[in-house]
Every structure is written in C-alpha cells, then in structure tokens.
Image (cartoon, rainbow, N blue to C red):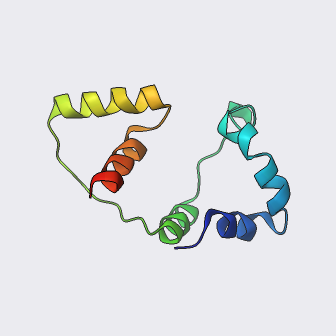
Amino acid sequence: MKSRKAYIKKKADGKVDELLEDAELWESKQLGASAEHARAASAEDDRELDDDLGLAPISLRLQKELVVKLKAMAKEEGLGYQTSIRQVLTRHV
C-alpha cells in the first residue's frame, strides 16, 4: 500500500509540502467543502485510490438497528458510517 504522501505526491505534481501544510484546513473543512468546488471522482480515480489503499468493495447484511447505531457513532465522530465501520473492524480484527 502506498503512503498518503506518495498518493498526494503523484496527484499533486511536486506540491506535496504545500498540500500537507494545508492538511489541517482541509480536515477542518475550511478548504474544499463548498459545493462550487465539488465534483464526483471518476471511476478510474476511485479504482486507483482503492488499489493504492488496498481496499476491496464488499456487500454485507447487518441488522437495521445495528446500522442505525453505527451511523450515529460515525456522525458523532464526524465520519461517514462506512469509514467508521472500517475503523471498528481494523481495531478489532
């Protein structure tokens, strides 16, 4: 798996240090959160990112109440619920 810095470097064409310095602004959504700057990633970008991060799409059936609880936990943490589920699995598996 490539590091986050390597992925950013590949995409940023040499502007890694500048981007990493601004990481806090991106994480706090002071940068990049406006609708005018948003666009969906291409299928090719999605596949490349999944490959770089070693991710595989899966289908999983869970009890509805469990999904509700997972979504609530994720919201409290400021995460998407799939990201939150991945973190829970990573910690406990």
Q: Is residue 71 above or below residue 4?
A: above
Q: Residue at x 44, y 26 (%)?
A: 76
| Nearer to the camera, 34 or 84 | 84
Q: Position of residue 2 (x, y in %)?
A: 58, 73
Q: Is residue 52 left or right of residue 82?
A: right
Q: Position of residue 60 (x, y in %)?
A: 21, 51
Q: How many marks?
A: 0
| Nearer to the camera, 73 or 68 | 73
Q: Is residue 36 left or right of residue 42?
A: right
Q: Is residue 87 left or right of residue 5?
A: left
Kindly indicate the quadrant of the structure image that contains residue 5: bottom right
Q: Residue at x 33, y 45 (%)?
A: 85
Kindly indicate the quadrant of the structure image that contains residue 66: top left
Q: Is residue 13 above or below residue 72?
A: below
Q: Is residue 53 above or below residue 84?
A: below
Q: Quadrant of the C terminus?
A: bottom left
Q: Residue at x 44, y 69 (%)?
A: 54
Q: Residue at x 52, y 61 (%)?
A: 46
Q: Position of residue 4 (x, y in %)?
A: 63, 63
